[in-house]
Amino acid sequence: MAKTKHLANQSVMANVDWLSIFLYAVLVIFGWMNIYSASLPLEPTSIFDLSQIYGKQLLFIIITIPVIIVILSLDAKVYEKYSIIYYVIGIVLLMGLFVFGKTIKGQTNWYQFGGISMQPSEFAKIGTALFLSKFLSESESLYGTLKEQAIPIGIIFLPVAFIMLQPDTGSAMIFAVLFFVLYREGFPAWYLWTGFLTILLFVLALLLKPYVLILLILVGCTLHYFVNKSINRNPIVYVLLALIMSAFVFSVDYVFENVLESHQKDRINVLLGGDNVNMKAEGYNLNQAMIAIGSGGLIGKGFLEGTQTKGGFVPEQHTDYIFTTVGEEWGFVGSLLVVACFVILILRIVYLAEEQKNNFARIYGYCVAAILFMHFFVNVSMLIGIFPTIGVPLPFFSYGGSSLIAFTLLLFIFLKLDANKVNEW
């Protein structure tokens, strides 16, 4: 038995994807360097000083080492076999926030025990990805009845419902990217198109007069009908779609003014460049972030030499705005290298997912790639003004024990599944 276990461990080390591990290590280490720069006090102390943000992050990094060892040591089948348990644990932790959670800045999305904090939504993503992968791997087809399609949608939206009640729009939005995984596994494309069209109409309704947008809708529906008439499109369906979209357009103004919170309206106005945006108030964060990134030029001002960083002009720079430190101190070249590391890692995961012999491992790989991409895209995009400012951490980079450990679990569970693909399931 001991010999078999030893051989299994040897197999994992021989077959684990070292390129992914290397990219993970680069992002974690470089992320810590930027956290160190963004949180360095006037009188520097030891890097192990736990009273400082960089000291705490270093401790979190050290904790991930035994976490990785345990993940790679466990039998790969436990992640599939007990996926529903991980999912239920995530849901229970989210529900528990309404009783035991701590409210910070109007959001009840943290547990705090003494000096230790934990954000369960980060870990709920793992449970959701595992259980969704388990369900999809056992489904014959997602082109079945609406009832059959409702189950995977329900798996995604159950944690979203609890997260929205916290309320934490940023974390909830990340789960929506799992619809791309459903589409990859055979889900009808109209779900994606409906989502894209809804977002597009919402934005256009804030920019254009309602009657102008409705005219564009009518023209678009008419052109689409005649272009696709050869495949027997029903004109009544087009009329109903035009009516539904027109009603949605008229509802946007009411939703914007009466449903969205004031800070959400401010963020959308900043993104759309409204005339009444105050760059010293609601537009301050974005303005300072863009100044910091732009000031780095081609090669940056140098490690620990960022004036915007040292002056504390960028709020929450060690967390959601950590990429501004990269832009200022490492410049365009450093920023490009960070982006390249993320892109290569995500593409590598997709490639490995396509190589899987087991459906569960393949689908889970897609989930990992999708979640990492969404976090990366939203975080970087909001700092350069092409996405609303939302509290979404940059994977492996932003300060925080919950996010670092959760992303480590998310990635290395897949790497364990990938290393096991040479074995029989």
Image: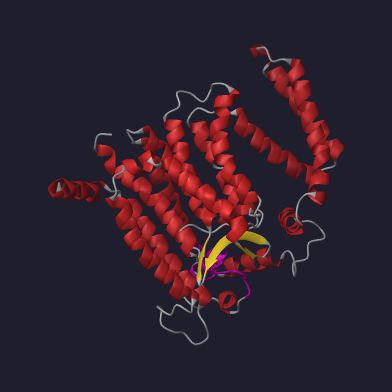
* Image position, residue 379 (x, y; %): 57, 56
Q: Position of residue 219 (x, y in %)?
A: 78, 27
Which residue shows up at 46% across the image and 48% down it? Answer: 126
- Vertically, is 368 above or below 122? above
**118 part of magenta stretch:** no
Residue with the most extreme left position: 3
Q: Is residue 157 visible?
A: yes
Q: Which residues are magenta?
A: 313-334
* 312, above or below 363, in the image: below
Q: Is residue 383 visible?
A: no
Q: Residue 132 vs residue 161: left or right? A: left
Position of residue 211 in the picture relative to residue 37 (left or right): right
Against 34, residue 68 (above or below) is above
Q: Where residue 101 appears, x then y in whole percent?
A: 59, 61
Residue at x-position 46% and y-position 33%:
135
In the image, residue 304 lies at what x, y percent?
48, 77
Pick the quarter of the image with the C terminus.
top left
- Residue closest to the eye, 85 or 387: 85
